Image (cartoon, rainbow, N blue to C red):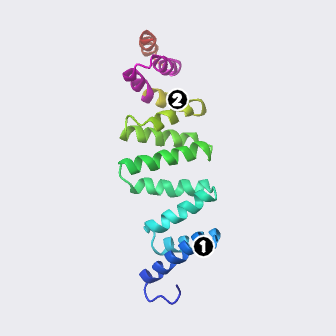
Amino acid sequence: AEDASSEEEKISILHKLGAELVETAKDYVRATDVYGEILRMSPEDEEAQEGLLALYRRDQRWTEVADMLARKAERLSDGADGVSVRIELAEIHEQHLDAPEPAVDLHIQVLDIDTQNERAVAGLERLLSRTERVVDIAVRLKPRYESAGNWDGVANMTQILVRTEQDSERREELLLQL
């Protein structure tokens, strides 16, 4: 790669080297370094980003995976790819980084894009007992439960809203809904 005449040629050689290190030599540490070098030269190189992401996942380097996925989510639109990346990132925050608050934010972002996303709903339900953001979750889930006829869910979300409501008139209004 040092003898390459252009940066594009060097990047191409480094891509081949990275793939060879992963697939044949199984030298994941050096492959990580190679993909990192590519990204220093060309930060938007998707092939290097995906290669490095795969190596971080393989090594369970969850903080690095989360950082890369967050950057990827910023680049992607709110389409299916963006939803998928946000769900994965939320699950990493929840399951591997013990960071429920960013996970709540990401699941809410997904529901803003796709109101019927079952994985986001399930994630918010799991996070109810692990977050301070129970009101945000209840506000998101209650209408969904109402439209689905899930009256136990409606009652649970209403109870959360009643417990946290400061205004006595609003609290009474919520209690009447039960």
Q: Secondary structure at mark 2?
A: helix
Q: Which label belongs to residue 24? A: 1
Find residue 53 and report its horizontal and vertical position in percent. 53, 60
Q: Which residue is mark 2?
A: 134
- Residues shaded magenta: 140-165
Magenta stretch mostly in which secondary structure?
helix
Find residue 129 and report its horizontal and vertical position in percent. 59, 29
Q: Nearer the viewer, residue 149 or 139?
A: 149
Q: Secondary structure at mark 1?
A: helix
- The correct choice, above or below, for 138 with respect to 63 in the image is above
Q: Nearer the viewer, residue 149 or 113?
A: 149
For image coordinates 49% across by 17% down, the residue present is 152
- The correct choice, above or below, for 68 with respect to 8 in the image is above
Is residue 162 inside the magenta stretch? yes
Say whether disc 2 or disc 1 marks the residue closer to the N-terminus: 1
Quadrant in which the C terminus is drawn? top left
Tag 2: amino acid: Val
Find residue 133 and report its horizontal and vertical position in percent. 52, 32
